[in-house]
Image: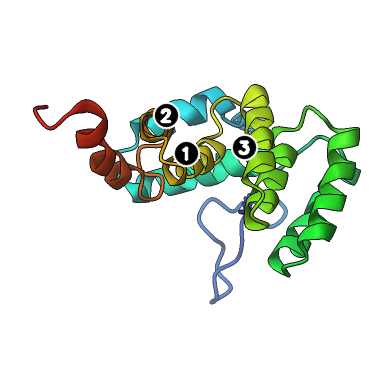
Amino acid sequence: MHRIATALIVGLTFTSSGALAQGEAPRGTPRQEKPDAPRRQPATLDELFERLSAAKSGEEARPISAQIERRWLRSGSDTADLLMGRAIEAMKGGDHPLAVEILDRIIAVRPGWAEAWNKRATVFFMMGDTARARADIGETLRREPRHYGALFGLASMLMAADEKKAAYEAFKRVQALNPHFGPVKTLIERLRPEVEGTDI
């Protein structure tokens, strides 16, 4: 869904006037190599989720959720990742049967990849097949219980089916994971009087 790029710029450059940049050794002077700074390890998913749940605003939450979603989109297999790209293109192009066919193949070879199940759930929902969409969301959440996108989809389907208490609980789980995800706060406020009563 999302992309990230990091750049590390090393070395010194001359200024536009030809003078040496700050810290540049004069010509003929042996350079003293500086020891490499220790590389920062990428944050773990657990750390990212901690930061996401503590985010104070949507602006703060967006880059964190983007990192999480990029992690979810990586299967560990170049072939599966390539197929996922094709499935997403089919989804965007409205070719839902082709998207399902590709996702079936991905799930066959990478059954533990939560995002493959989530994407197929999305396609089934777009096709109007809520029964299979809900089944695939269940598979997604068995593999990644913190998948707030899948939880939000499930809550939306529960609300449409008038299962308001279950929808309310699912929306609250989304909010606990990603407090600024879509309209989750508004939907919780809308459902609260019906589920918990008006005297709260």
Per the image, the residue denoted by label 2 is: 166
Quarter where residue 88 is shown: bottom right
Q: Which amino acid, by three-letter code, is at mark 3?
A: Arg
Instruction: Quote the CA–CA distance across marks 3 and 2.
Output: 13 Å
Instruction: Residue 10: give x, y in percent of width and height.
Output: 64, 50
| One can see residue 139 in this view | yes
Q: Which residue is mark 1?
A: 158
Camera-side residue of 82 and 99: 99
Q: Is residue 30 visible?
A: no
Q: Residue at x 25, y 44 (%)?
A: 190
In contact (CB < 8 Å): disc 3 and disc 2: no
Q: Position of residue 37 (x, y in %)?
A: 61, 32
Within the image, what quadrant is residue 95 found in?
bottom right
The secondary structure type at the circle numbered 3 is: helix
- Tag 1–tag 3 contact (CB < 8 Å): no
- Under mark 1, the amino acid is Leu
Give the image location of residue 77, x and y in percent.
86, 38
The alpha-carbon separation of the residues under discs 1 and 3 comes to 9 Å
**Label 2 neighbour load within 10 Å: few <14, some 14-19, many 20+:** some
| Residue at point 48%, 41% (across, down) | 152
**What SS does tag 2 mark?**
helix
Residue 132 in the figure: left or right of residue 149: right
**Left-right relation of 52 to 150:** left
Q: Are marks 2 and 1 in contact (CB under 8 Å)?
A: yes
Between 83 and 104, the one lying in front of the other is: 104
> Which label number is shown at residue 134?
3
Which badge, 1 or 3, comes first in the chain's sequence?
3
Compare residues 187 and 33 and report the one nearer the observer. 187
The residues bearing labels 2 and 1 have C-alpha atoms spaced at a distance of 7 Å
Give the residue at x 72% y 38%.
117
